[in-house]
Amino acid sequence: MGTVAILGAGVMGETLLSGLVRSGRSAGDLVVTARRAERADELVERYGVRAMSNVEAAETADTLVLVVKPQDMAGLVEEISDHVAPGNLVVSLAAGITTAYLESRLPAGVAVVRVMPNTPALVDEGMAAISPGRSADLPHVEEAGELLRSCGRVVQVAEKHQDAVTAISGSGPAYIFYVVEAMIEAGVVLGLPRPTSTELVVQTLFGAATMMRETGQHPTVLREQVTSPGGTTAAALRQLDDHKVRAAFMSAIEAAAQRSHDLASGNG
Ligand SMILES: NC(=O)c1ccc[n+]([C@@H]2O[C@H](COP(=O)([O-])OP(=O)(O)OC[C@H]3O[C@@H](n4cnc5c(N)ncnc54)[C@H](OP(=O)(O)O)[C@@H]3O)[C@@H](O)[C@H]2O)c1
């Protein structure tokens, strides 16, 4: 494993950087770039990594991780393009930027891997989906996967599925926070102190998620286990069905995927 440069180390870039440092990558093998000098200084001080210009980073590193906002991608790629060597790996975390877009702007033979991460990467519980471009071979895909595994789990998907991934795991934490907010408010309506309601809901979510992961059982089976005939849970689920909550989730996630598609095709 060679030198890894994180170009545009903002929120997501720092999340990945801290994951890499915690997972044992030597700070000497990590490079960051930033638009503002004070941001670069902050990262150098916090992680002991080196800060460079984008061009220097492109010339130095074997793997370049592009973490600027999608609208800043064209400028960044134009700046580094002449300095990236064929055989190097370029990993892009920018939503909606395709591997074909990057390949057409980088020298032939540069391997490109597209990633959709999510924010639980901040606590090492991220879910990242990676899609290799045309020139990326197995070692490149493994290197990209290894980078992302430093802050969570990784799956490989065909690039045509990245809009669906964006709608499910990219935006997904927001849907969960929304449900949690609603449950906390319901507890408050029933007279629970807000901190108590919050603790009950957050630990219930954590416990339910852990149960699904550890038992490997289908959520339907787990739900049926807490749904006694004629009981409290059945009464609640009947209300959720009456309010078409399942259908609302389907429509919401379809809308997110459509929005992702539109933004990626410049129709945003
Ligand atoms: N955050 C998420 O939940 C999430 C989830 C999935 C995907 N992503 C993707 O991750 C990418 C980054 O998102 P973010 O939330 O981390 O944004 P961010 O905090 O704004 O980070 C981007 C950083 O890049 C810097 N930058 C911009 N142009 C640059 C250039 N030419 N050279 C060097 N640095 C440059 C920015 O500098 P300034 O501070 O000066 O603007 C900023 O610090 C996006 O493309 C997004 O689609 C994010």
Image: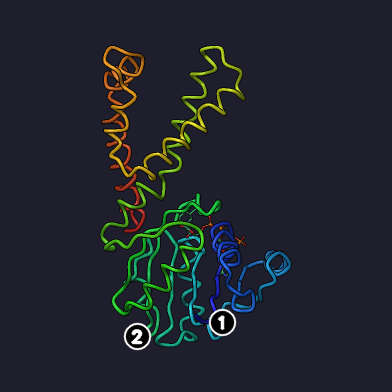
Give the residue type at disc 1. Answer: Val
Residue at image mark 2: 108
- Expressed as whole percent of the image width and height from the top left, the position of residue 35 reads 62, 68
Q: How many marks?
A: 2
Q: Residues within 10 Å of mark 2 (few under 14, many from 20)?
A: few
Who is closer to the viewer here, 98 or 169? 169
Residue 75 lies left or right of residue 136; in this view the side is right
Q: Which badge, 2 or 1, is on the more N-terminal residue?
A: 1
Residue 247 lies left or right of residue 174; in this view the side is left
Q: Residues within 10 Å of mark 1 (few under 14, many from 20)?
A: some
Residue 5 lies left or right of residue 248; in this view the side is right
Who is closer to the viewer here, 89 or 2? 2
Marker disc for residue 55:
1
- Expressed as whole percent of the image width and height from the top left, the position of residue 259 reads 34, 48
Q: Secondary structure at mark 2?
A: loop
130 up-or-down from 177: above or below: below
Quadrant for residue 211, please give it: top left
Marker disc for residue 211:
none
Say which residue appears at 32% left-offset and 57% top-offset: 162
- Expressed as whole percent of the image width and height from the top left, the position of residue 143 reads 42, 74
Give the residue type at disc 2. Answer: Ala
Instruction: Locate ligand 1 by image quadrant.
Output: bottom right
Who is closer to the viewer here, 83 or 263? 83
- Expressed as whole percent of the image width and height from the top left, the position of residue 236 reads 35, 17
Say which residue appears at 51% left-offset and 18% top-offset: 187
Q: CA distance from mark 2 to mark 1?
A: 18 Å
Residue lying farthest to the front in this orientation: 215
